[in-house]
Amino acid sequence: MENVNEQNQDGNNDNDSSDGEVEALALAGNIPLDIPPRDIPGRHIRALSDPPHSALKHRSRSEERPPCPSAGCLKRSSEVFNQISSPRFINPLITKPRPNNMDKLTLIVDGTRFVVERSLFVAHPNTMLGRMFGSANDYTTRNEKGEFEVAHGISASVFKCILDYYKMGTINCPPSISIPELREACDYLLIPFNAHVIKCQNLRELLHELSNDGAKGQFQEFLEEFILPVMINAAKKGNRECHIVILAEDDVVDWDIEYPPSMGEEYHQIIYSNQLHRFFKYFENRDVAKDVLKERGLKKIRLGIEGYPTHKEKIKQRPNGGLEVIYNYVQRPFVRMSWEKEESKSRHVDFQCVKQKTGTPGLIEAVDEPAALAAAGAINAPRPPPVVLGAYPEEFE
């Protein structure tokens, strides 16, 4: 047992190295100085300090151990590895995703099935279908077969044309589909309707829809620039309606002070504008303007063309001795609207009978005596006379 202990002690002494031996090897360049001295076994220290065996001298260079790479080489190798492992250096031929069946959507429109890729809708997130199938939120519901029923009220032929917008960016409208029907579908699905998107053979209907859009935007500018200031001035005077006549800029109004027109034109407001005069020349523009005024909350809207007196032509003597003034009239567009809230009460007077308290001085109550006695249960109370619509009282005497 003592021999074993001595051997273990000798072995421990072999495993541990002294500080002097490590410093001597460090000065000789055999080991780095940053390694703790107790972590290096003693046999390694002696192997490094002993001269190499003679057999090692005859070993070929190919059998020698390659030198340890330096810190700079290791840093460059790690940088290259990080660059190769980044997503930009991934080979697309190796990592190409396989087609997934979930990318295919089956849509049912007007009883017709359409198989469409989801990526087409994702590419147009501002449209209704792009918001339904392209966002993270689930706005859709499937039927028992996993299909989606969308675009209610749109025919299958129109929806087929609309799918061209998601595939090519344009909609080719065949002659069998009307432009108003296509316009309604585009507005419902939030697809832009303009000359860059819509391609059709019927230019008249296409230009008509484009003119309606342009007229709506143009009239909104005219409303803010010309019409609204006149309405505000009329409202400041206590008026609740306004009648505006649009005259051309070269029209001259010269009324006679002694003999003005007798049709109430003095209460009309006048706007001199060639642009607005030309705008109201078209019937379709007047319809668009009427819709805009309705959207702004105005009532009793009238738009049209009427005669407006400009200047006095002559004075004619009537047979009874009176004078008749003849004015020159020009046909000009007009706009009339109202913002009155209680228009029904302004034109009708309601007379209400209010029952006063009994005993008020000067109040004489009319009592139907036969009816009152019958209600009180009198035995010999006379019966009330019959009432017949359209008959006079003397007919029952």
Image: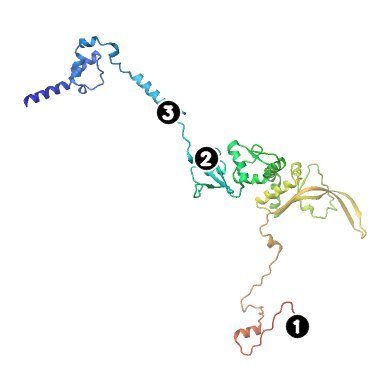
Residue in the picture at 69% in, 52% down: 235
Q: Which residue is mark 3?
A: 86
Residue in the picture at 10% in, 23% down: 7
Depth order, front residue of 148/13: 148
Q: How is the image coloured?
A: rainbow
Query: Please, what secondary structure does the residue beneath circle 1 have?
Result: helix
Residue 222: x and y in percent read 70, 44
Q: Which residue is mark 1?
A: 395
Mark 3 residue crowding within 10 angstroms, few (<14) / some (14–19) / many (20+): few
Callout 2, which amino acid? Answer: Arg
For this orientation, the residue located farthest to the bottom is 380
Mark 1 vs mark 2, foreground winner is: 2
Callout 1, which amino acid? Answer: Glu
Q: Which residue is mark 2?
A: 118
Disc 1 and disc 2: Cα gap in Å? 87 Å
Disc 2 and disc 3: Cα gap in Å? 28 Å
Disc 1 and disc 3: Cα gap in Å? 111 Å
Q: Is residue 264 left or right of residue 139?
A: right
Residue 135 disc label: none
Sequence-wise, which precedes: disc 1 or disc 3? 3
Query: Looking at the rendering, which quadrant does residue 338 occupy?
Result: bottom right
Residue 239: x and y in percent read 71, 55
For this orientation, the residue located farthest to the left is 2
Q: Are marks 1 and 2 in contact (CB under 8 Å)?
A: no
For this orientation, the residue located farthest to the right is 319
Residue 68: x and y in percent read 30, 18
Q: Are marks 2 and 3 in contact (CB under 8 Å)?
A: no
Q: Is residue 86 left or right of residue 104?
A: left
Query: Please, what secondary structure does the residue beneath circle 3 have?
Result: loop
Mark 1 vs mark 3, foreground winner is: 3
